Amino acid sequence: MSAISYHDKRFTLASNSGPGDAKPGSTTFHFRQSGCLVWATYSGGAIELGTFIGKADQQGRLELRFQQITSAGEFKAGTGESIPEILPDGRLSLRERWRFTSGDDRSGEAVFIEIPAKDTSKDLQAAFTRGQTFQEFARSRLCHLQETLDQYAQFALTPVLRYELKQSAAKIGPLRALVITEDWCPDCVLNLPVLAHVAEAMGNLDLRVVRRPDVHDLANRFPGPDGKSHIPTVVFFRNGGEQIGTWIERPASAHRWLKQFLGKYPIPPLEFVNNLPSPELHAWMKLRTADERGPYLQEFCWDAIREWKTILFQGETP
């Protein structure tokens, strides 16, 4: 086991002696860790997206392999070795020797500095306090208002599932769910009304909705697998701010459906005016929502509920 924990730490590039694409002050890294395995996503500078995977020894030194795609669309890969140092203020510094293994053997030395962690628990609670209830959000949407209300009206939990949710909820105490989304989000049209039904059945899951532009910094602390913010993002936490888990965008089964839909109806240019979609994009969103509603209510909604239950009832069998 490594003496140093890298999990959920963020680093910024402080210096780079070689001809790499990472730029000091612009490239940031988000680390994860499980045992001796360490991995991260990174972007910024001339890097559109990069990932690395490595292993840490008992002193926390890292041996890693990285791959990245540049803003110019060029793929690159390489290796690195990092030595950690604890700074006087308690933050971590990493000194890394790296070398490209694709195309050439250029190399260099870089220094990474830990970005101070923000108090996410306080920010979650502050956003929750400012948030809207489901009904308030649904009736104030500037886009897809009727579709959201229709989805809520057309969905119903089975009596057995309502009972199971109520019973399991009684064992875990009060919880909160903060939904980060946008008025135009089609996934929110489908998933948020179902989550509202789940919260009502549980009786102790307090649900609030905030718009991403109002909590942009907080939203970026819950990235998807590509390191970027996606909507809707649902953060489940206890009343004191302790996070339980997050759920992003849509259930796995809906991802497969969307891939097939995009094959038939490619998404038009992502053009927005005052954070509302262009007429062409809005028409595509309405078509997607209408086409997906049937399979969603038959299948995808139950997959979403199973995924939420896994997060909410860890250790319980709802």
Image (cartoon, rainbow, N blue to C red):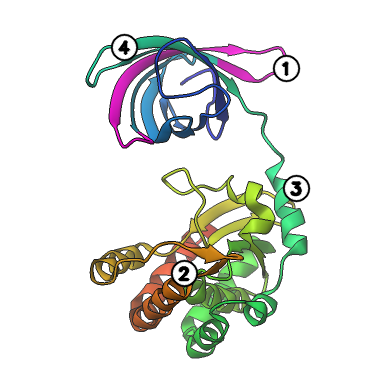
Magenta segment's dominant SS is: strand
Which mark is in front, 2 or 1?
2
Residue type (three-letter) at the residue carrying disc 1: Asp
Residue type (three-letter) at the residue carrying disc 2: Asp
Whichever of callouts 4 and 2 sits on the residue coming sooner in the sequence is: 4
* Label 1 environment density (alpha carbons within 10 Å; few <14, some 14–19, many ≥20): few
For label 4, the residue is: 106
Whichever of callouts 1 and 3 sits on the residue coming sooner in the sequence is: 1
Compute the Cα span from label 4 to label 1. Answer: 34 Å
The residue drawn where x is 53% and y is 17% is 3
The residue drawn where x is 67% and y is 62% is 176
Compute the Cα span from label 2 to label 3. Answer: 27 Å
Q: Which mark is residue 89?
A: 1
Q: Which mark is residue 122?
A: 3
Q: Residue 308: within the magenta?
A: no
Q: Secondary structure at mark 2?
A: helix
Magenta residues, start to end: 70-93
Residue type (three-letter) at the residue carrying disc 3: Lys
Q: Are marks 2 and 1 in contact (CB under 8 Å)?
A: no
Q: Are marks 1 and 3 in contact (CB under 8 Å)?
A: no
For label 2, the residue is: 187
> Is residue 151 positioned above or below 111 on the image?
below
Which mark is in front, 3 or 4?
4
Q: Which mark is residue 288?
A: none
Q: Where residue 229 sits in the image (x, y, percent)? A: 52, 51
Q: Nearer the viewer, residue 6 or 99?
A: 99
The residue drawn where x is 62% and y is 64% is 171
